[in-house]
Amino acid sequence: MATQRLSMFADWEGKRQKTDIKGKPLQAAFYKASTSDIAVSLLGKVLLHNVDGKILSGRIVETEAYLSQGDPACHASRGMTPRNRPMFGPPGRAYVYFIYGNHFCFNVVTATQGVGEAALIRALEPLSGLEEMSVIRNTMNKRLLCSGPGRLCQALRIDGSCNEADLSSGRLLLLDDDYTYDDIIAVPRIGIKRAANLLLRFYPAGNQFVSRPGIPKQEV
């Protein structure tokens, strides 16, 4: 079984070995747009975590936008708290929080400092470190490694120590390698009761790595 695991993941690594380390870190100019537009633009970008020299990475395939105005599902909608304080920091920082007592969620702070908005990263297409991800996640199903906010944090070893990390430098990075998707779908967000009608979840049409395909409501 161990030999089979090594063989399968060696093949995956071979296909992605070059693409997972290319790209330039996203800079301040990327965050000049609205949060919903940034959430769409994050699709196709690479999230990379260097854990003691081991590169774990994936391409972003699903996001959700959380807004400071007209969006009671946003953590920042009722003002700043010790938990959501990173959301009010400069854009391009990580906002990582613990939920349901069992997993972390990774968000990208998107708005001007003091506003309180972010894009939740819901799913990735795994690119590098797949063998390690499979051990962490206890699955050899590539689609299930990072298809969900808790799963991707587990697979990439993202936890509370990553909170407020500058995503343009350091061990946790957002990279642009010029990869884009043609057809983006906008649907309601998952797991919320308030503002559940807002079309603020985004993913590429037909992508197999999304956490949960929705009934298309709108093409972006």
Image: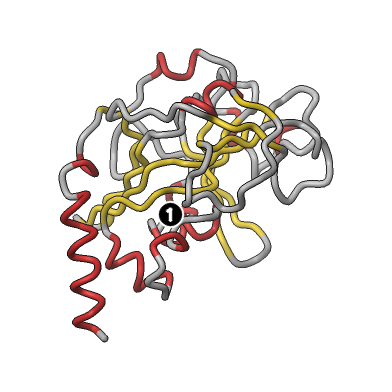
The answer to which quarter of the image holds residue 64 is top right
Do we see residue 78 in this rendering? no
Q: Quadrant of the N terminus?
A: bottom left
Give the farthest residue toward the bottom. 1
Q: Is residue 10 above or below residue 51?
A: below
Q: Residue at x 32, y 49 (%)?
A: 57
Give the farthest residue toward the right. 194
Q: How is the image coloured?
A: secondary structure
Left or right of 12? Residue 40 is right
Left or right of 1? Residue 141 is right
Q: Residue at x 52, y 24 (%)?
A: 38
Q: To which residue does mark 1 refer? A: 158
Q: Quadrant of the C terminus?
A: top right
The answer to which quarter of the image holds residue 194 is top right
* Residue 20 at x, y percent in the picture: 24, 44
Left or right of 79? Residue 201 is left
* Residue 84 at x, y percent in the picture: 64, 40
Is label 1 in a helix, a strand or a loop? loop
Left or right of 97? Residue 31 is left
Q: Is residue 39 above or below residue 94?
A: above
* Residue 91 at x, y percent in the picture: 49, 25
Count of numbered labels shown in the rendering? 1
Q: Which amino acid, by three-letter code, is at mark 1? A: Ile
Q: Nearer the viewer, residue 203 or 160?
A: 203
Q: Is residue 160 above or below residue 206?
A: below
* Residue 188 at x, y percent in the picture: 72, 38
Q: Residue at x 29, y 67 (%)?
A: 132
Q: Nearer the viewer, residue 101 or 23?
A: 23
Neighbor class of circle 1 (other Cα within 10 Å; few <14, some 14-19, many 20+) is many
Do we see residue 104 in this rendering? yes
